[in-house]
Image (tube, coloured by chain):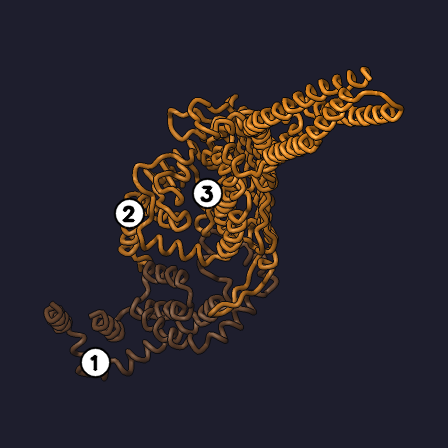
Amino acid sequence: MFLLKTLKSIIVMFQTDISPNQIAWGFALGAILGLIPNMFMKLVLFIVIMLFRVNISAALIGCSLYAIVSYPLDFLFDSVGYTVLNINLLNSFYTWLYNLPIVPFTHFNNTVVMGSLVVGIILLAPNGVFAKKFLVYYRTNLKDKISKWKIVKILSSSILVTKIVNLVKQVKI
Amino acid sequence: MKIIRWKFLSITAVVVALVILFNILFLDKILKNTIISLAQPIAGAKVEIDYLKTSLKNCSVSIRGLRVADRNDYFKNLIDIEKINFDVRFWPILRKKFIIDEMSVDGIKWQTQRKTSGQLPPKQEKKFVKEKKDSKFSKMFESAKTKTIAEVNKLPSVEMFNNIQEQINNFDINKIVKNTDLSSVKEAEKIYNDLQNKYKQYQDKINNFNYEEKINKAKKIIDDISKSKISSLKDISNTAKKVSQLKEIKEDVDEILKELDTIKKDISVTINVSKQLKNSITNDVDTICDKISIPNLNTKNISQMLFGNKWVLRVEKALYYFSIIKQYLPKKSAEEKAEEVKQRDKGRDVLFKEKKYPTLLISKINISGTTAKTKEEQGVDFSGLIKYISSSPDMVSEPITLNISGNNNAQKLNIAGTFDHRTNNSKDVLKVSFYGLSGKDLNLEPNAYLPLIDTANLDFVGNFDIDSFGFKSVVDLSVNNIKEKNLNSIDGNLKYLAQVTNTIKSFKVNLSAQTQNSENLDVKITSDIDKKLYDAINKLFSSKVNEAKEKIKQTVNELAQAKIKEIEKSLEGNKNEVLKQIKEKIGEANDFNKQIEKAINKR
């Protein structure tokens, strides 16, 4: 059911006129969410995504894509994180952070956490720009063609989706 | 465009409110259960908390009625605390640090009675026993303890005391005398035989004098002389010859008279067998007395036998609690903190200079309590301070210190300790002194050979040292003002023992136990009770032996005198018979001598 609803909301996101900026921000923030391994930091970022009016479906797409990508790239995040954490200029800043309440829960001093966060932040603007451009291109060139697909029509119909959900519920009972 | 999703914000606020509400309603219960579930496996017995209240406003915790059961006696509490109050600093909690500046622990009691058993459910008990068994400390001490107890039990003193008791109980002089071959009796028999032989020899001698023959011969000569007539020189010569013969016979008779007189004088001496047997009787008494000599006491072992097992068990108990303290005061070496990068499963942790806050720090604990186990009991009210309890002692500049004192005029308590775990080589020192305790606290089984220790005043001074290599504990016990046993309630020979042990009014005991590198447990127990008991038992035996000697002397004398009387009576008869015979012979000889003299003078 969650999958159906998610699929529906993704199709709705692409097919309707939701602001491209919201989608771009959602995708970019979702990408960071997918990259970082620390649960506490994920929770903080999730609250940020939920709190600000960015597109949640786009965030989910970004999170899923980058979560898959992040696993083979741990070695890269490790070396990036190690480099960043060992910048002498920032040492006092890190020490200050390290001694703040709550912040140590983010595990920012871990090389993979810091590396993935830094890479995520670096990719924030490119991801945003890419997502926005892709959406604009899609809505201009692909939207009409795809809207004719049967699966898109089914999932777009809210009545049908509701019927399928109820049917699944009855079968479960 | 609205940037913020207010709906999400309000939902979040509701969730936070629910979480706070949940904490207010259930946090206390959760915390209470958590403390109990954490403490029970440590104590190995039930832990109970009557009431626990937290306040989120001040981050304060208040606990009432904390009781930890004693796993050595499930119907007693190892510790019973009336109330505990403390505030936790808020911000460090967010960094998983629990910093308590001041804690108060009031109404501490120990060994209080429980209404219900403090035994853990079988599952938890099994887990505790396994963990305890598997611990390095437990294995080390268990092996050392087994060896020591075996050695203490092997001590000859146990047997020695049994032998003493047996000797006292089986003390029967008549039996001892009966089983002894008395030389005085033998000597008396010898004297009797000798005298009998002597009398017989004299009688034989008297009979062999040929007395009759001499008389007859003399009578014939006298008769011849009286009948003869002197008519010629030849007659004169014959008569002179016969007179000469008479003179010879008279000389022989005089000789016999002399011998008879000598025999008479010899026999007439009073028979005094007692005088002759005096030395033999003395020898007999000495021989028997040697058989009841004082047993050879090994004084070094007495106190070890009396206090050995208990001391080992108490050391074990003390060390068990020490081991718990050690276990929950982990060492954190400075070298570990100096490491800049720590390898993790995913990535590496780069460590930065951290403010020296351990996970748990209790800067100061004010404690107060009483040694009284019940409200009715008169105990010592004590108070004191524990400082710098920390989960990472190396982060704190001072070691954990403990200072407790109490005084109620009759009793005085002082406990001082330092637990230094700031380096890899930890060192714990605890000094406990308790003056004015009761002798009952020693829990010694009543013993016929000991004075009434339960009635005494007891002073206890103990030093316990534990470091990374081993432990050493030294305890000085001073037992004073021992009351006397009531002799009326004691029967038999033990009464004498009680009389002697009643003379012991005080004694001292020094107990030490140490081990190095987890090897052998070296237990040493010395006490002046060894000497005092030795002297006491010695005195008991000396008085018993002197008493027995008198009785033995009397018994041996009685036996010898009976024999002597019998002998003397028998000998007296024989003697009188010989004397009578001599008297007769002397009378006859004198008459005969007169006749001879008359005959000679006539001619």
Q: Residues within 10 Å of mark 1 (few under 14, many from 20)?
A: some
Task: Give x and y (percent) for residue A130.
Answer: 39, 76
Q: Residues within 10 Å of mark 3 (few under 14, many from 20)?
A: some
Q: Colour of chain A?
A: brown
Q: Nearer the viewer, mark 3 or mark 1?
A: 3
Q: Which mark is residue B217?
A: none
Q: Identify the secondary structure beneath mark 3.
A: loop
What is the CA distance from the residue labelled 2 to the residue labelled 1? 48 Å
Q: Which mark is residue B89?
A: 3
What is the CA distance from the residue labelled 3 to the residue labelled 2? 21 Å
Amino acid identity at mark 1: Ser
Q: Is residue A148 above or below residue B347?
A: below
Residue B135 or residue B518, whichever sits in front: B518
Q: Is residue B109 above or below residue B40?
A: above
Q: Identify the secondary structure beneath mark 2.
A: helix
Q: Residues within 10 Å of mark 2 (few under 14, many from 20)?
A: few
Contact? badges 3 and 1 (CB < 8 Å): no
> Which of the 4 quarters of the picture holds residue A41?
bottom left
Q: Chain of mark 3?
A: B
Task: Give x and y (percent) for residue B371.
Answer: 45, 30
What is the CA distance from the residue labelled 3 to the residue labelled 1? 60 Å
Residue position for label 2:
B22
| Residue for point 15% across, 74% down | A157
Q: Is residue A136 left or right of residue B565?
A: left
Q: Is residue B536 left or right of residue B248?
A: left
Q: Which mark is residue A147?
A: 1
Q: Colour of chain B?
A: orange
| Residue for point 61% across, 53% down | B516
Residue B12 or residue B320, whichever sits in front: B320
Q: Chain of mark 2?
A: B
Marked residue nearer the N-terminal end (3 or 2):
2
